[in-house]
Each structure stands twice: as structure tokens, then as C-alpha cells.
Amino acid sequence: DAGVTQSPTHLIKTRGQQVTLRCSPKSGHDTVSWYQQALGQGPQFIFQYYEEEERQRGNFPDRFSGHQFPNYSSELNVNALLLGDSALYLCASSLGGDEVSGHEQFFGPGTRLTVL
Amino acid sequence: AQSVTQPDIHITVSEGASLELRCNYSYGATPYLFWYVQSPGQGLQLLLKYFSGDTLVQGIKGFEAEFKRSQSSFNLRKPSVHWSDAAEYFCAVARGGATNKLIFGTGTLLAVQP
């Protein structure tokens, strides 16, 4: 049973560029959440997708956008990259329709984004 | 607003010694509580969770945590630490309901001395 997978593993971009990160959820999961983890910090919630809709959003600007596909995989897009966007981006999957077990999130290995 | 505090940024213990990592949360009701571990350059692995019921919960790798409502705490413990336990540990809370975003503490980095 494959867990949560993310691609690419590492990415280097320059300021002003745009980036797309990808996530495939754990088999059987239908909800994908994205988190940003800056160096030395805990992960910060960006947004969550369920049934191809953004269900909740954290305190991130509109430069951060996402998408969920019918197969439940998801993309995170960041436009107009800033140096401060350098971080580990983590994807987590869960079961969206279950009140209790839906709160158990399984994380992927992350994508390390460096903005120069 | 919900928040999670992990007062210890860095802890060093000797191999075989006991361990307790502290976590305090701020929330009006009883949240869902989690401990995750992160090895260098890796994602997060769930160690244990508390949703309801018995306030002492057992997790993987010999870890346990105790929920104390009166102290708004959810401390992580292990009776005997192994060198492979060296990692960063994150406490997290979720509010419950339709959305399950996790709010994380800033983490505690555990070093294990031989």
C-alpha cells in the first residue's frame, strides 16, 4: 500500500518565478492538505482540498493556490516566488468524510523548495 | 485562537534514560491531540493520537502520552530512549468538525548521547 507521495523531492527557483508541487494521497484517502514548514519551525497549514474544492484555507496570500483532481491527487501552485517561500512543503492525506479518523493525517516526505 | 506550545526547543538525554517532552495547548474545548516525529530531511510520522476516552494513550516505538485537561497538556514520554529516537518531535492539535487542519508547535529537537 503506497503512502503519500510527493514530487519533486527538491526544487530550486528564482524570485518571481512560479512553481507547481504535486501530491498523491494514500490509497483510499480523499482529502489532501498542504503545509509549509520553514527551517526550524513547525508546519503551517496552507489549505485543504476535499471533493475537488478548497475546504479551508490558512493565512497564506493568494499567490498560493491549489487544485484537486478526480483521482484525489493534488497540486500546489505558488506564483511570484519570494525568498521567504523557501521551505519544505508537506502534503498530508486523510479521509474527509469521517469525523474522527478524518483527523488522522498521513504525511508525505515533502518537497524542499529553495528560492534564490 | 488555538495555539500549541512546546517549551523545550532542544533536549539531550543519554541512551537508556527516560524522556518527557512537554506540550501545552490553548483551546476552549478538548481538541484532538497528536504527536509526530520528523527525522532529518523527512516528512512527519504519527507517533500517537488522542481523540477521547482513556487519557493515557500508547503509540508506536514505545512512546506514550497523557492528556491532562486541567493542565491543558499532552506530554510525550518514553521509559528508555534509544539512539534511533534522535529526531524532532512536534505536538499538534485539531479542532474537530468538518475541517481537520493541524496546528503545530515549534518542535523539540531530541539528541541522544551514547
Image: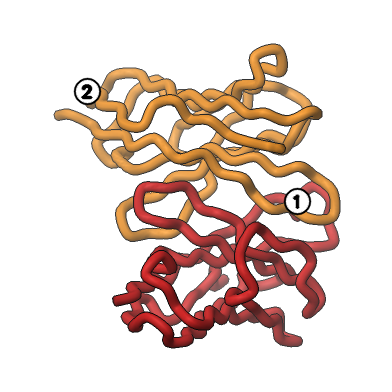
Residue corresponding to mark 1:
A101
Q: Residue furthest left?
A: B114
- Relative to A115, say whether B110 is above or below: above
Place of residue B104 in the rendered image (x, y in percent of width and height, measured from the top left): 56, 43
Tell me which corner region of the image, top left, top right, bottom left or bottom right, holds residue B7: top left
Foreground pick, B103 / A26: B103
Judging from the image, mark 2 belongs to the subunit labelled: B
Q: Is residue A46 left or right of residue B40?
A: right
Q: Residue furthest top?
A: B70
Place of residue B80 in the rendered image (x, y in percent of width and height, measured from the top left): 34, 23
Residue corresponding to mark 2:
B14
**Quarter of the image where the C terminus of chain B is located:** top left
Tell me which corner region of the image, top left, top right, bottom left or bottom right, holds residue B37: top left
Foreground pick, A7 / B78: A7
- Relative to A57, say whether B38 is above or below: above
**Disc 1 versus disc 2: distance between alpha carbons?**
36 Å
Q: Is residue B31 left or right of residue B59?
A: right
Work out whether disc 1 and disc 2 sit on a shared chain: no
Q: Characterize the local packing of mark 2: few (<14), some (14-19) or many (20 or more) Cα atoms within 10 angstroms.
A: some
Judging from the image, mark 1 belongs to the subunit labelled: A
Chain ID for red: A
- Report the amino acid beneath label 1: Ser
- Report the amino acid beneath label 2: Ser
Chain ID for orange: B
Place of residue A71 in the rendered image (x, y in percent of width and height, measured from the top left): 71, 85
Q: Secondary structure at mark 2?
A: strand
At horizontal 59% and vertical 41% (from top left) the residue drawn is B92
**Quarter of the image where the N terminus of chain B is located:** top right
Foreground pick, B15 / B96: B96
Q: Is residue A52 left or right of residue A115?
A: right
